[in-house]
Amino acid sequence: MLKIGVLALQGAVQEHIKSLQAPDVETVIVKRTDQLEALDGLVFPGGESTTMRRLVNKYGFYEPLRAFAAAGKPIFGTCAGLILMADRIAQEPQGHLQLMDMNVQRNAFGRQRESFETTLVVKDVAEDIEAVFIRAPLISSTGDDVEVLSSFNGEIVAARQNHLLACSFHPELTDDTRFHQYFVQMVRESKETAPEHTAVT
Amino acid sequence: MADRGTDRVKRGMAEMQKGGVIMDVVNAEQAKIAEEAGAVAVMALERVPADIRAAGGVARMADPTIVEEVMSAVSIPVMAKARIGHIAEARVLESLGADYIDESEVLTPADEVYHLDKSEYTVPFVCGARNLGEALRRVGEGASMLRTKGEPGTGNIVEAVRHMRMVQSELNKVAGMSKDELMTEAKNLGAPYELLLGIKETGKLPVVNFAAGGIATPADAALMMQLGADGVFVGSGIFKSEHPDKYAKAVVEATTHYQDYELIARLSRGLGTAMQGLEMSTLDPSERMQDRSW
Protein backbone atom coordinates (compact mmCIF):
# COMPACT_ATOMS: atom_id res chain seq x y z
CA MET A 1 0.00 0.00 0.00
CA LEU A 2 1.01 3.58 -0.66
CA LYS A 3 0.48 5.94 2.24
CA ILE A 4 -0.31 9.48 1.13
CA GLY A 5 -0.88 12.21 3.69
CA VAL A 6 -2.73 15.52 3.46
CA LEU A 7 -1.32 18.26 5.68
CA ALA A 8 -4.35 19.26 7.78
CA LEU A 9 -3.42 22.47 9.59
CA GLN A 10 -6.12 24.46 7.78
CA GLY A 11 -7.96 24.37 4.46
CA ALA A 12 -9.75 21.93 2.14
CA VAL A 13 -8.47 18.55 3.36
CA GLN A 14 -11.36 16.13 2.73
CA GLU A 15 -11.58 17.07 -0.96
CA HIS A 16 -7.99 15.91 -1.49
CA ILE A 17 -8.59 12.68 0.42
CA LYS A 18 -11.48 11.96 -1.96
CA SER A 19 -9.45 12.71 -5.11
CA LEU A 20 -6.46 10.57 -4.02
CA GLN A 21 -8.52 7.38 -3.70
CA ALA A 22 -7.07 4.35 -5.52
CA PRO A 23 -7.05 0.62 -4.70
CA ASP A 24 -3.44 0.76 -3.51
CA VAL A 25 -3.65 4.09 -1.65
CA GLU A 26 -4.21 4.65 2.04
CA THR A 27 -4.83 8.30 2.94
CA VAL A 28 -3.76 9.95 6.18
CA ILE A 29 -4.87 13.27 7.70
CA VAL A 30 -1.63 14.76 9.00
CA LYS A 31 -1.79 16.99 12.09
CA ARG A 32 1.43 15.99 13.87
CA THR A 33 5.05 15.74 12.71
CA ASP A 34 5.40 12.14 13.97
CA GLN A 35 2.95 11.04 11.26
CA LEU A 36 5.31 12.05 8.44
CA GLU A 37 7.79 9.21 8.64
CA ALA A 38 5.35 6.49 7.58
CA LEU A 39 4.25 8.42 4.47
CA ASP A 40 5.27 7.83 0.84
CA GLY A 41 3.84 11.12 -0.41
CA LEU A 42 2.24 14.29 0.92
CA VAL A 43 -0.28 16.90 -0.27
CA PHE A 44 -0.28 20.56 0.80
CA PRO A 45 -3.93 21.59 0.38
CA GLY A 46 -5.45 24.92 -0.57
CA GLY A 47 -6.32 27.35 2.20
CA GLU A 48 -4.80 30.58 3.46
CA SER A 49 -1.02 30.42 3.02
CA THR A 50 -0.26 32.96 5.78
CA THR A 51 -2.37 30.97 8.25
CA MET A 52 -0.79 27.68 7.21
CA ARG A 53 2.74 29.07 7.48
CA ARG A 54 2.08 30.27 11.04
CA LEU A 55 0.75 26.87 12.02
CA VAL A 56 3.70 25.13 10.28
CA ASN A 57 6.07 27.10 12.49
CA LYS A 58 3.97 26.75 15.62
CA TYR A 59 3.82 22.97 15.45
CA GLY A 60 7.42 22.43 14.42
CA PHE A 61 6.62 21.25 10.87
CA TYR A 62 9.14 23.50 9.15
CA GLU A 63 12.27 21.32 9.27
CA PRO A 64 10.43 17.96 9.10
CA LEU A 65 8.67 19.04 5.89
CA ARG A 66 11.94 20.17 4.33
CA ALA A 67 13.53 16.86 5.33
CA PHE A 68 10.58 14.99 3.78
CA ALA A 69 11.23 16.74 0.46
CA ALA A 70 15.01 16.26 0.75
CA ALA A 71 14.47 12.50 1.20
CA GLY A 72 13.00 12.47 -2.33
CA LYS A 73 9.44 11.73 -1.27
CA PRO A 74 6.84 13.31 -3.59
CA ILE A 75 4.88 16.42 -2.54
CA PHE A 76 1.89 17.99 -4.33
CA GLY A 77 0.84 21.56 -3.47
CA THR A 78 -2.33 23.27 -4.70
CA CYS A 79 -2.87 27.04 -4.49
CA ALA A 80 -1.71 27.94 -0.95
CA GLY A 81 0.28 24.68 -1.03
CA LEU A 82 2.13 25.93 -4.13
CA ILE A 83 2.99 29.15 -2.27
CA LEU A 84 4.43 27.14 0.64
CA MET A 85 6.69 25.22 -1.79
CA ALA A 86 8.12 28.14 -3.79
CA ASP A 87 11.70 29.36 -3.31
CA ARG A 88 10.68 33.00 -3.81
CA ILE A 89 7.46 35.01 -3.33
CA ALA A 90 6.97 38.43 -4.91
CA GLN A 91 6.92 41.32 -2.40
CA GLU A 92 7.95 39.08 0.48
CA PRO A 93 11.49 38.87 1.88
CA GLN A 94 11.70 35.09 1.36
CA GLY A 95 9.81 31.94 0.46
CA HIS A 96 8.30 29.60 3.06
CA LEU A 97 9.58 26.02 2.75
CA GLN A 98 11.69 26.87 -0.34
CA LEU A 99 11.42 23.48 -2.01
CA MET A 100 10.88 24.37 -5.69
CA ASP A 101 13.00 26.65 -7.84
CA MET A 102 10.31 29.13 -8.89
CA ASN A 103 9.04 32.66 -8.28
CA VAL A 104 5.39 32.98 -7.33
CA GLN A 105 3.03 35.88 -7.03
CA ARG A 106 0.18 35.69 -4.51
CA ASN A 107 -3.41 36.68 -5.41
CA ALA A 108 -2.09 37.19 -8.93
CA PHE A 109 -5.47 37.14 -10.67
CA GLY A 110 -7.08 39.63 -8.25
CA ARG A 111 -9.62 39.37 -5.46
CA GLN A 112 -12.46 36.85 -5.07
CA ARG A 113 -14.72 38.56 -7.64
CA GLU A 114 -12.00 37.92 -10.26
CA SER A 115 -11.78 34.22 -9.33
CA PHE A 116 -12.85 31.88 -12.14
CA GLU A 117 -12.98 28.39 -13.57
CA THR A 118 -11.73 27.18 -16.93
CA THR A 119 -10.45 24.14 -18.82
CA LEU A 120 -6.69 23.59 -19.15
CA VAL A 121 -4.26 21.51 -21.15
CA VAL A 122 -1.93 19.84 -18.63
CA LYS A 123 1.15 18.16 -20.14
CA ASP A 124 1.32 14.39 -19.51
CA VAL A 125 -2.10 14.47 -17.81
CA ALA A 126 -4.94 15.55 -20.14
CA GLU A 127 -6.10 18.14 -22.68
CA ASP A 128 -9.22 19.11 -20.74
CA ILE A 129 -8.59 19.42 -17.01
CA GLU A 130 -11.30 21.39 -15.18
CA ALA A 131 -9.55 24.04 -13.12
CA VAL A 132 -11.03 26.24 -10.38
CA PHE A 133 -8.94 29.32 -9.55
CA ILE A 134 -9.70 31.03 -6.22
CA ARG A 135 -7.70 34.14 -5.34
CA ALA A 136 -5.02 32.09 -7.04
CA PRO A 137 -1.26 32.60 -7.22
CA LEU A 138 0.74 32.16 -10.41
CA ILE A 139 4.26 31.05 -11.17
CA SER A 140 6.02 34.07 -12.70
CA SER A 141 9.23 32.21 -13.58
CA THR A 142 10.93 28.86 -13.03
CA GLY A 143 14.47 27.49 -12.74
CA ASP A 144 16.06 25.16 -15.31
CA ASP A 145 15.09 21.98 -13.45
CA VAL A 146 11.42 22.87 -13.36
CA GLU A 147 9.13 21.59 -16.09
CA VAL A 148 6.10 23.71 -16.96
CA LEU A 149 3.00 21.50 -17.17
CA SER A 150 0.32 24.08 -17.85
CA SER A 151 -0.24 27.74 -18.66
CA PHE A 152 -3.29 29.97 -18.74
CA ASN A 153 -3.20 33.15 -20.87
CA GLY A 154 0.58 32.85 -21.01
CA GLU A 155 1.01 32.54 -17.22
CA ILE A 156 2.39 29.36 -15.66
CA VAL A 157 -0.21 27.61 -13.48
CA ALA A 158 1.23 24.09 -13.02
CA ALA A 159 4.80 22.80 -12.80
CA ARG A 160 6.92 19.84 -11.75
CA GLN A 161 10.47 19.62 -10.42
CA ASN A 162 11.42 15.93 -10.16
CA HIS A 163 9.34 14.60 -7.24
CA LEU A 164 7.64 17.95 -6.53
CA LEU A 165 4.34 18.95 -8.17
CA ALA A 166 2.48 22.24 -7.79
CA CYS A 167 -0.49 24.04 -9.32
CA SER A 168 -2.27 27.39 -8.80
CA PHE A 169 -5.77 25.96 -9.12
CA HIS A 170 -7.89 23.47 -7.18
CA PRO A 171 -8.27 20.09 -8.92
CA GLU A 172 -9.70 18.83 -5.58
CA LEU A 173 -12.84 20.96 -6.02
CA THR A 174 -13.92 19.05 -9.13
CA ASP A 175 -14.91 15.43 -9.74
CA ASP A 176 -12.03 15.15 -12.21
CA THR A 177 -9.34 13.15 -10.36
CA ARG A 178 -6.83 12.78 -13.21
CA PHE A 179 -4.37 15.34 -11.89
CA HIS A 180 -4.38 13.71 -8.44
CA GLN A 181 -3.95 10.30 -10.02
CA TYR A 182 -0.92 11.66 -11.92
CA PHE A 183 0.53 12.51 -8.49
CA VAL A 184 -0.42 9.09 -7.10
CA GLN A 185 1.55 7.58 -10.02
CA MET A 186 4.55 9.77 -9.07
CA VAL A 187 4.33 8.34 -5.54
CA ARG A 188 4.13 4.78 -6.92
CA GLU A 189 7.22 5.30 -9.07
CA SER A 190 9.12 6.97 -6.25
CA LYS A 191 8.40 4.10 -3.90
CA GLU A 192 9.45 1.50 -6.50
CA THR A 193 12.78 3.18 -7.10
CA ALA A 194 13.48 3.75 -3.41
CA PRO A 195 12.99 0.37 -1.76
CA GLU A 196 14.29 1.60 1.59
CA HIS A 197 10.98 3.42 2.13
CA THR A 198 9.07 0.15 2.10
CA ALA A 199 10.86 -1.04 5.21
CA VAL A 200 9.37 1.85 7.17
CA THR A 201 5.73 0.90 6.58
CA MET B 1 -12.39 31.29 -21.59
CA ALA B 2 -12.85 32.00 -17.90
CA ASP B 3 -16.15 31.79 -15.98
CA ARG B 4 -16.45 34.01 -12.93
CA GLY B 5 -18.90 33.78 -10.04
CA THR B 6 -19.85 30.13 -10.66
CA ASP B 7 -21.09 28.00 -7.75
CA ARG B 8 -17.79 26.13 -7.67
CA VAL B 9 -15.77 29.33 -7.51
CA LYS B 10 -18.01 30.88 -4.84
CA ARG B 11 -18.44 27.77 -2.67
CA GLY B 12 -14.79 26.81 -3.20
CA MET B 13 -13.70 30.07 -1.59
CA ALA B 14 -15.50 28.99 1.62
CA GLU B 15 -13.96 25.50 1.38
CA MET B 16 -10.52 27.12 1.60
CA GLN B 17 -11.48 28.75 4.91
CA LYS B 18 -12.24 25.43 6.63
CA GLY B 19 -10.62 24.80 9.99
CA GLY B 20 -10.00 28.52 10.34
CA VAL B 21 -11.11 31.53 12.33
CA ILE B 22 -12.72 34.64 10.81
CA MET B 23 -12.42 37.71 13.04
CA ASP B 24 -14.43 40.93 13.26
CA VAL B 25 -12.23 44.03 12.95
CA VAL B 26 -13.00 47.74 12.83
CA ASN B 27 -9.72 49.18 11.51
CA ALA B 28 -6.39 48.35 9.83
CA GLU B 29 -4.58 47.89 13.13
CA GLN B 30 -7.01 45.21 14.34
CA ALA B 31 -6.94 43.56 10.91
CA LYS B 32 -3.15 43.20 11.15
CA ILE B 33 -3.41 41.70 14.64
CA ALA B 34 -5.94 39.19 13.27
CA GLU B 35 -3.76 38.28 10.26
CA GLU B 36 -0.69 37.98 12.47
CA ALA B 37 -2.59 35.61 14.77
CA GLY B 38 -3.43 33.34 11.82
CA ALA B 39 -7.03 34.33 11.02
CA VAL B 40 -8.15 32.99 7.60
CA ALA B 41 -10.21 36.12 6.90
CA VAL B 42 -11.45 39.28 8.58
CA MET B 43 -14.89 40.87 8.70
CA ALA B 44 -14.59 44.65 8.28
CA LEU B 45 -17.16 46.49 10.39
CA GLU B 46 -17.86 49.93 11.78
CA ARG B 47 -18.61 48.43 15.21
CA VAL B 48 -18.38 44.90 16.65
CA PRO B 49 -21.78 43.36 17.54
CA ALA B 50 -21.41 44.07 21.30
CA ASP B 51 -21.05 47.78 20.49
CA ILE B 52 -23.91 47.69 17.97
CA ARG B 53 -26.03 46.25 20.78
CA ALA B 54 -24.91 48.95 23.20
CA ALA B 55 -25.35 51.80 20.69
CA GLY B 56 -28.90 50.88 19.62
CA GLY B 57 -30.51 52.69 16.67
CA VAL B 58 -30.24 51.47 13.07
CA ALA B 59 -27.09 49.48 12.20
CA ARG B 60 -26.04 49.76 8.53
CA MET B 61 -23.26 48.71 6.15
CA ALA B 62 -19.84 50.04 7.25
CA ASP B 63 -18.37 53.21 5.80
CA PRO B 64 -16.52 52.13 2.60
CA THR B 65 -13.39 53.85 3.98
CA ILE B 66 -13.16 51.20 6.70
CA VAL B 67 -13.61 48.31 4.25
CA GLU B 68 -10.95 49.77 1.93
CA GLU B 69 -8.57 50.49 4.81
CA VAL B 70 -8.82 46.87 5.95
CA MET B 71 -8.47 45.52 2.38
CA SER B 72 -5.23 47.41 1.88
CA ALA B 73 -3.85 46.40 5.31
CA VAL B 74 -3.98 42.59 4.90
CA SER B 75 -3.54 39.94 2.21
CA ILE B 76 -6.10 37.50 3.65
CA PRO B 77 -9.71 37.75 2.35
CA VAL B 78 -11.89 40.60 3.62
CA MET B 79 -15.61 40.16 4.29
CA ALA B 80 -18.20 42.85 4.97
CA LYS B 81 -21.79 42.93 6.18
CA ALA B 82 -24.85 44.17 4.28
CA ARG B 83 -28.36 44.53 5.73
CA ILE B 84 -30.78 41.69 4.97
CA GLY B 85 -32.48 42.41 1.64
CA HIS B 86 -30.47 45.58 0.98
CA ILE B 87 -29.62 45.15 -2.71
CA ALA B 88 -27.77 48.48 -2.95
CA GLU B 89 -25.52 47.88 0.07
CA ALA B 90 -24.62 44.45 -1.27
CA ARG B 91 -23.81 45.84 -4.73
CA VAL B 92 -21.72 48.62 -3.18
CA LEU B 93 -19.66 46.11 -1.17
CA GLU B 94 -19.24 43.98 -4.30
CA SER B 95 -18.01 47.01 -6.23
CA LEU B 96 -15.48 47.78 -3.49
CA GLY B 97 -14.00 44.32 -4.04
CA ALA B 98 -15.04 42.70 -0.73
CA ASP B 99 -14.23 38.98 -1.02
CA TYR B 100 -17.38 37.78 0.74
CA ILE B 101 -20.59 39.48 1.87
CA ASP B 102 -22.42 38.55 5.07
CA GLU B 103 -26.15 39.22 4.65
CA SER B 104 -26.40 39.68 8.36
CA GLU B 105 -29.03 39.88 11.09
CA VAL B 106 -26.47 41.81 13.16
CA LEU B 107 -27.43 44.84 11.07
CA THR B 108 -31.00 46.17 11.05
CA PRO B 109 -32.90 44.37 8.24
CA ALA B 110 -33.82 46.50 5.22
CA ASP B 111 -36.49 44.06 4.02
CA GLU B 112 -38.68 42.08 6.39
CA VAL B 113 -40.06 39.78 3.68
CA TYR B 114 -37.33 38.98 1.16
CA HIS B 115 -33.66 38.09 1.42
CA LEU B 116 -31.26 38.95 -1.41
CA ASP B 117 -31.19 36.83 -4.57
CA LYS B 118 -27.57 35.95 -3.94
CA SER B 119 -27.26 33.83 -7.08
CA GLU B 120 -27.20 37.05 -9.13
CA TYR B 121 -23.90 38.29 -7.68
CA THR B 122 -20.31 37.47 -8.63
CA VAL B 123 -19.23 37.85 -5.00
CA PRO B 124 -20.12 34.94 -2.67
CA PHE B 125 -22.43 35.35 0.35
CA VAL B 126 -22.55 33.89 3.85
CA CYS B 127 -25.85 33.82 5.77
CA GLY B 128 -26.94 32.88 9.28
CA ALA B 129 -29.32 30.05 10.16
CA ARG B 130 -30.90 28.57 13.30
CA ASN B 131 -32.07 25.31 11.76
CA LEU B 132 -31.90 23.24 8.59
CA GLY B 133 -34.92 24.82 6.91
CA GLU B 134 -33.51 28.30 7.29
CA ALA B 135 -30.06 27.11 6.16
CA LEU B 136 -31.45 25.52 3.00
CA ARG B 137 -33.64 28.51 2.15
CA ARG B 138 -30.49 30.64 2.18
CA VAL B 139 -28.63 28.13 -0.01
CA GLY B 140 -31.66 28.09 -2.31
CA GLU B 141 -31.30 31.88 -2.66
CA GLY B 142 -27.63 31.41 -3.56
CA ALA B 143 -25.68 31.58 -0.28
CA SER B 144 -22.25 29.92 -0.75
CA MET B 145 -21.53 29.54 2.96
CA LEU B 146 -23.56 29.24 6.16
CA ARG B 147 -23.02 30.07 9.80
CA THR B 148 -25.07 29.53 12.92
CA LYS B 149 -26.73 32.73 14.05
CA GLY B 150 -26.11 32.22 17.75
CA GLU B 151 -26.82 35.45 19.58
CA PRO B 152 -24.26 38.02 18.38
CA GLY B 153 -22.46 40.34 20.75
CA THR B 154 -23.41 38.41 23.89
CA GLY B 155 -20.25 36.36 24.49
CA ASN B 156 -22.70 33.60 25.44
CA ILE B 157 -22.27 30.36 23.50
CA VAL B 158 -25.66 28.84 24.36
CA GLU B 159 -27.53 29.98 21.24
CA ALA B 160 -24.75 28.97 18.82
CA VAL B 161 -24.75 25.53 20.43
CA ARG B 162 -28.52 25.31 20.11
CA HIS B 163 -28.39 26.19 16.41
CA MET B 164 -25.49 23.89 15.55
CA ARG B 165 -27.09 20.96 17.36
CA MET B 166 -30.40 21.65 15.64
CA VAL B 167 -28.86 21.75 12.15
CA GLN B 168 -26.83 18.58 12.78
CA SER B 169 -29.76 16.59 14.15
CA GLU B 170 -32.04 17.65 11.29
CA LEU B 171 -29.27 16.75 8.79
CA ASN B 172 -28.95 13.29 10.29
CA LYS B 173 -32.70 12.84 10.22
CA VAL B 174 -32.94 13.74 6.52
CA ALA B 175 -29.93 11.58 5.63
CA GLY B 176 -31.70 8.61 7.20
CA MET B 177 -35.08 9.16 5.54
CA SER B 178 -36.34 7.19 2.59
CA LYS B 179 -36.87 9.10 -0.62
CA ASP B 180 -40.68 9.01 -0.41
CA GLU B 181 -40.55 10.90 2.90
CA LEU B 182 -38.50 13.81 1.54
CA MET B 183 -41.23 15.90 -0.12
CA THR B 184 -43.25 16.07 3.10
CA GLU B 185 -40.08 16.89 5.02
CA ALA B 186 -39.33 19.65 2.48
CA LYS B 187 -42.79 21.07 3.14
CA ASN B 188 -42.35 20.84 6.93
CA LEU B 189 -38.91 22.47 6.86
CA GLY B 190 -39.81 25.02 4.22
CA ALA B 191 -36.72 23.90 2.32
CA PRO B 192 -36.12 23.19 -1.40
CA TYR B 193 -36.77 19.52 -2.20
CA GLU B 194 -33.71 19.20 -4.47
CA LEU B 195 -31.41 20.22 -1.61
CA LEU B 196 -32.93 17.54 0.64
CA LEU B 197 -32.27 14.97 -2.11
CA GLY B 198 -28.64 16.10 -2.11
CA ILE B 199 -28.38 15.71 1.68
CA LYS B 200 -29.85 12.23 1.53
CA GLU B 201 -27.14 11.33 -0.97
CA THR B 202 -24.11 12.98 0.69
CA GLY B 203 -25.16 13.16 4.35
CA LYS B 204 -23.99 16.75 4.57
CA LEU B 205 -24.86 20.34 3.74
CA PRO B 206 -24.08 21.49 0.18
CA VAL B 207 -21.91 24.35 1.53
CA VAL B 208 -19.50 24.98 4.40
CA ASN B 209 -21.12 25.76 7.79
CA PHE B 210 -19.24 27.86 10.37
CA ALA B 211 -20.21 28.65 13.97
CA ALA B 212 -20.93 32.24 14.98
CA GLY B 213 -22.72 34.33 17.56
CA GLY B 214 -21.35 34.18 21.10
CA ILE B 215 -17.90 32.56 20.81
CA ALA B 216 -15.75 34.23 23.49
CA THR B 217 -12.96 31.82 24.50
CA PRO B 218 -10.60 29.20 22.97
CA ALA B 219 -12.71 26.49 24.63
CA ASP B 220 -15.87 27.92 23.02
CA ALA B 221 -14.21 27.65 19.60
CA ALA B 222 -13.13 24.06 20.31
CA LEU B 223 -16.66 23.18 21.47
CA MET B 224 -18.21 24.42 18.23
CA MET B 225 -15.67 22.49 16.12
CA GLN B 226 -16.52 19.38 18.07
CA LEU B 227 -20.23 19.87 17.40
CA GLY B 228 -19.47 19.80 13.67
CA ALA B 229 -18.66 23.38 12.68
CA ASP B 230 -16.28 23.74 9.70
CA GLY B 231 -14.68 26.79 11.33
CA VAL B 232 -15.62 29.74 13.54
CA PHE B 233 -16.43 33.44 13.36
CA VAL B 234 -15.38 35.42 16.40
CA GLY B 235 -17.04 38.80 16.60
CA SER B 236 -16.76 40.78 19.79
CA GLY B 237 -14.81 38.04 21.63
CA ILE B 238 -11.33 39.04 20.44
CA PHE B 239 -11.21 42.81 20.56
CA LYS B 240 -13.45 43.10 23.65
CA SER B 241 -11.00 40.92 25.62
CA GLU B 242 -8.16 42.27 27.72
CA HIS B 243 -5.29 41.10 25.45
CA PRO B 244 -6.64 40.82 21.87
CA ASP B 245 -3.38 39.60 20.30
CA LYS B 246 -2.93 36.72 22.76
CA TYR B 247 -6.61 35.94 22.62
CA ALA B 248 -6.66 35.84 18.82
CA LYS B 249 -3.73 33.41 18.66
CA ALA B 250 -5.24 31.16 21.32
CA VAL B 251 -8.59 30.96 19.51
CA VAL B 252 -6.86 30.06 16.20
CA GLU B 253 -4.87 27.28 17.84
CA ALA B 254 -7.83 25.90 19.75
CA THR B 255 -9.78 25.74 16.47
CA THR B 256 -7.01 23.79 14.68
CA HIS B 257 -6.48 21.34 17.55
CA TYR B 258 -9.97 21.24 18.99
CA GLN B 259 -9.54 17.78 20.45
CA ASP B 260 -6.19 18.41 22.13
CA TYR B 261 -7.38 19.34 25.61
CA GLU B 262 -3.95 19.68 27.18
CA LEU B 263 -3.12 22.24 24.53
CA ILE B 264 -6.40 24.10 25.08
CA ALA B 265 -5.71 24.14 28.84
CA ARG B 266 -2.32 25.66 28.12
CA LEU B 267 -3.85 28.19 25.72
CA SER B 268 -6.52 29.22 28.21
CA ARG B 269 -4.06 29.88 31.04
CA GLY B 270 -3.46 33.52 32.00
CA LEU B 271 -5.28 34.97 28.98
CA GLY B 272 -6.74 37.82 31.03
CA THR B 273 -10.39 38.75 31.19
CA ALA B 274 -12.71 37.57 28.44
CA MET B 275 -15.47 39.85 27.18
CA GLN B 276 -18.14 40.50 29.80
CA GLY B 277 -20.98 38.48 28.26
CA LEU B 278 -24.78 38.58 28.57
CA GLU B 279 -27.22 36.06 30.02
CA MET B 280 -30.02 35.31 27.51
CA SER B 281 -32.90 35.84 29.97
CA THR B 282 -31.77 39.45 30.48
CA LEU B 283 -32.36 40.17 26.77
CA ASP B 284 -35.66 41.71 25.81
CA PRO B 285 -37.24 39.81 22.85
CA SER B 286 -36.77 42.95 20.73
CA GLU B 287 -33.01 42.77 21.38
CA ARG B 288 -32.63 39.24 20.00
CA MET B 289 -30.81 39.57 16.68
CA GLN B 290 -31.31 35.91 15.73
CA ASP B 291 -35.07 36.43 15.33
CA ARG B 292 -34.59 39.13 12.71
CA SER B 293 -34.83 36.84 9.69
CA TRP B 294 -36.68 33.69 8.85
Image (tube, coloured by chain):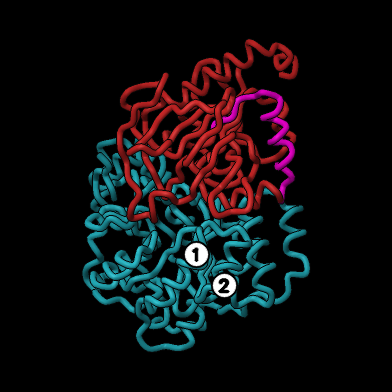
Residue B161: where, in percent of width, then height? 52, 61
Classify mark 1: residues with Cα within 10 Å, few (<14), some (14-19) or many (20+): many
**C-alpha span from label 2 to label 1:** 9 Å
Q: Residue furthest front?
A: A144
Tell me which chain appears red.
A
Name the residue nearer the viewer: B53 or B67: B67
Image marks 2 and 1: residues in contact by CB distance under 8 Å: yes
* Chain B visual colour: cyan
Residue B150: where, in percent of width, then height? 47, 67
**Amino acid under label 1?**
Val
Q: Which mark is residue A101?
A: none
Apparent side of residue B82 relative to residue B30 in the rendered image (left or right): left
Residue A145: where, in percent of width, then height? 57, 26
Q: Which residue is mark 1?
A: B42
Residue B127 part of the magenta segment: no
From the viewer's perspective, is residue A11 above or below residue B70? Answer: above
Please, which chain is the residue tagged with disc 1 on? B
Res B258 seen here: no
Name the secondary structure under disc 2: helix
Name the residue nearer the viewer: B101 or B201: B101
From the viewer's perspective, is residue B78 above or below residue B179? Answer: below
Q: Which mark is residue B30?
A: 2
Q: Earlier in the sequence, mark 2 or mark 1?
A: 2
**Amino acid under label 2?**
Gln
Name the secondary structure under disc 1: strand
Please, which chain is the residue tagged with disc 2 on? B
Give the residues in magenta. Answer: A58-76
